[in-house]
Image (cartoon, grey):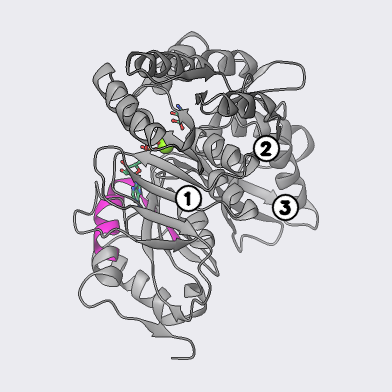
Amino acid sequence: MSLVVQKYGGSSVADLERIRLVARKVKKYWQEGHRLVVVVSAMGKTTDTLLSMALELCPLPPERELDMLLSTGEQVSVALLGMALFQEGVQAVSLTGGQAGIVTTQAHTKAKILHIQTERILRYLADGKVVVVAGFQGKTANEDITTLGRGGSDTTACALAAALKADFCEIYTDVNGVFTADPRIVPQARKITRIAYDEMSEMANLGAKVLQLRAVDFSQRYGVRVHVRSTFSEEEGTWVEEVSEMEEVKVKAITHSKDVVKVVLLGVPNQPGVAALIFKVLAEFSIFIDMIIQSEGRETEKDVAFVITKEDEGKAQKAINCLKECLSFREAKFDDSKGKVSIVGAGIASNPRIAYRMFDGLARLGVNIDMISTSNLRISCLIPRDRVEDSVQILHKEFLEEGEVVLRENS
Ligand code: ADP
Ligand code: ASP
Ligand code: MG
C-alpha cells in the first residue's frame, strides 16, 4: 500500500467549494487504498491579509508574534478540510505543524526544520485515517509556534514525505506543472515534463514560486520524487527528480522576481576587511544576498552594491544602522525600482554565446542592465522593474520558442 504526501496550495482551498473539491479528490485516493498525508496552505490570500494587518499596527512586528498570527491561516484550512472529509465519509484528523511533530529552529518567520517526530502521524495512518497537516509551520523545542518562510507549505510537504519515506510527494497548485516561464506572463510557456533537482532549485531561487526553494533542496537531499500538478485537472504535471545525463547545454526556463531591493553603500573605505565586515553584519541578521558589485571607486573609497529580497528590507535597514557603528561610509541607498530576470539551465553560464544572446535580447528591447550575476546554472540581470514582463517574454522567445537552439559542449 503506497504512502503519498499531497499538498494543496492557497488557491486550491480558496473557498468552501474548492475545499469540497479537494475533499473529494482526497476521498478518491483514500478509497483506492493509498495512505495519505495531506498538507494544506491558508485559504487564498489569507497570509497576505494577516501580514498587512500586522504591518499596519506595527511596521517591524516582533517575529514571534508574527508567527503566532500567520500560522492561524493554515489552522483554519486544516480544520475546514477535516470537516469536509468527515462530511464525505472519510476518516480524517487535522493537526497543526507542532502536533504533527515538526520541530524547528527558533528563527521566527524563516525557521528551519530540525526533525520530525513521526509517531503520531504513523499511528493515525495505521488506523486508516487521512492525516491533514497545517503547512508552513512548526514548533520550537520550547513549544513556540514558528513559520517556515513564504511558500513554506511546499517545504512541510516535502519534509514530511522525506521523514515518512513516502513513495512520492504531490504538489497540487493552480497551474499544470512547472513551465518554461511563468504562464501568467508568457502564454506560450510550455510545461516541462521532467526537471532535475538542481535546475528546479535554481528556478525556485530565482523567483519561480511554483515550488519553494527549501522544498526542492529537501527533496533532493532525501531523494523524494515530487510531482507538481493542477488541482483542477487530471493531467500529468512535472516530475522533479534525479535526471542523470545532461549532455545538452540549454536554457530550460526563464524566471523573474519583482520582490527585490538594491542596496548601495556609497563611500566605503577602500581597505582590506571592509567587505568582510559588511557581509558579516548582514549575515548576523540572516539576510539573503544575491548579486554583489564593488565599484572601481576612488583611491580611498569605493561603492558596494548588493541585492536583497523585499521581505528582508526592514531587517537590512536595521543591519545597516548597526554597521554604521563600526564602519564609516557616506550614505546607504535603498532602491526599490528594480526587478530580476534570469535564464536557467545546467551549464549555461559556461557558454559565452548564451550570455551574449541574453544581453542582446535585452538590448533590443532597450532595457538597461544594472547588475549581472552568474553561476553554472544561471545568468541573472537586474533591470528596471517595469521592464520585467517584456524582458521575460523576449527571452522566452529567444531561447524557448522558434526552433530552440541546443548547444552542445565545446560548440
Ligand atoms: P500555491 O498557492 O498552490 O502554493 P503559488 O502561487 O505559490 O501556488 O505558485 C503557483 C504560481 O507560480 C502559478 O500560479 C504561477 O503564476 C507561478 N509561477 C511562476 N513561475 C512559474 C513557472 N515557471 N511554472 C509554473 N508556475 C510558475
Ligand atoms: N500560506 C503561506 C504563504 O502564503 C504558506 C504557503 O502558502 O505555502 O506563504
Ligand atoms: Mg506556493
Image location of residue 23, percent across then percent down: 34, 25
Image location of residue 176, percent across then percent down: 29, 48
User: Taking 37 as reference, is 365 left or right?
Assistant: left
Specify the amino acid type for callout 2: Ser
Which one is in front in this view, the residue at disc 2 or the one at disc 1?
Answer: 1
Which one is in front in this view, the residue at disc 2 or the one at disc 3?
Answer: 2
| Front one among 296 and 345 | 345
Q: Earlier in the sequence, mark 2 or mark 1?
A: 1
Residue indicated by mark 1? 226
Q: Earlier in the sequence, mark 2 or mark 3?
A: 3
Q: Is-magenta flag for residue 394? A: yes
Residue indicated by mark 3? 275
Question: CB under 8 Å between callouts 2 and 1?
Answer: no
Residue drawn at (53%, 48%) of the image: 167
Image location of residue 237, percent across then percent down: 33, 52
Stretch in magenta: 380-395
Residue 284 in view (yes/no): yes
Which element type, helix, strand or loop, lies under badge 1? strand
Which element type, helix, strand or loop, lies under badge 3? helix
**Disc 1 C-beta below 8 A from ligand 1:** no
